[in-house]
Amino acid sequence: DAKTTQPTSMDCAEGRAANLPCNHSTISGNEYVYWYRQIHSQGPQYIIHGLKNNETNEMASLIITEDRKSSTLILPHATLRDTAVYYCIVRVANAGGTSYGKLTFGQGTILTVHP
Amino acid sequence: DGGITQSPKYLFRKEGQNVTLSCEQNLNHDAMYWYRQDPGQGLRLIYYSQIVNDFQKGDIAEGYSVSREKKESFPLTVTSAQKNPTAFYLCASQYRSSRVNTEAFFGQGTRLTVV
């Protein structure tokens, strides 16, 4: 799986948008970008994933650059409960069966949302 | 409710004793994973299993063993050969599909302390 690079920490004011960047310059054509977050002492929670198109769900938006070498997770209106470690992961897609699955986590970005 | 359950939440053992961590899921997921997390670190993969009666070593398998006799269960044994067993252990499961790229669901973790 391709390696990712994220800033160690970021701050965001409550109610503002939080934009979390991720570099994955060695991503392959069949690798997806996934985002998870982990609140202290809990299991990671899935947020969103995408291949090359921008994606949006009820939690966040994912913007992937045209060359797919970087992406940005956007939390449109951050709340105090969004304070967590955010992990950006790239991994091989499921299609085709056996080569899927292994999630390799890096250090992630510690996002602190303050009042 | 469907989910993935790890037990116990906290576990204390004496040095030199083997200990088994439980992970059960009722999501009908094919794949299951065990990760270890140390303070301030990301998750590291210990073992994973894509189907019943089959499993593969992850990045840090030494000192650990697993079994996958049932689809729902993937217990992890921390043996006395593991030099630094004190850590936060996370189990995850994932639906396997050749058509859809799916996300992994995580349990709430077991915090193992060896004294």
Image: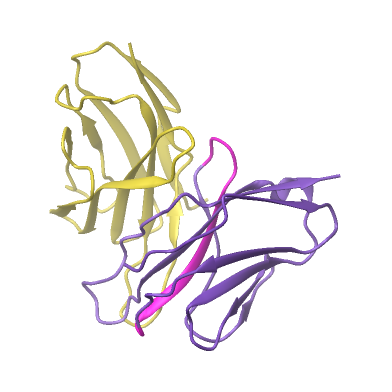
Chain colours: A purple, B yellow
Q: Residue at x 19, y 48 (%)?
A: B68
Q: Quick check: B54 left or right of A43? A: left
Q: Which residues are magenta?
A: A29-42
Kindly indicate the quadrant of the structure image that contains residue A103. bottom left
**Is-magenta flag for residue B66?**
no
Q: Residue at x 25, y 81 (%)?
A: A96
Kindly indicate the quadrant of the structure image that contains residue A58. bottom right
Q: Quick check: B113 left or right of B63? A: right
- In percent of width and height, residue A89 lies at 44, 63
Q: Quadrant of the C terminus of chain A?
A: top right
Q: Quadrant of the N terminus of chain A?
A: bottom left
Q: How many marks?
A: 0
- In percent of width and height, residue A50 lies at 51, 78
Residue B26 lies, with reference to residue A4, above or below; the image says above
- In percent of width and height, residue A46 lies at 53, 59
B94 or A87: nearer the eye?
A: A87
Q: Residue at x 53, y 40 (%)?
A: A42
**Is-magenta flag for residue A35?**
yes
B86 or B110: nearer the eye?
A: B86
- In percent of width and height, residue B108 lies at 48, 40
B4 or A47: nearer the eye?
A: A47
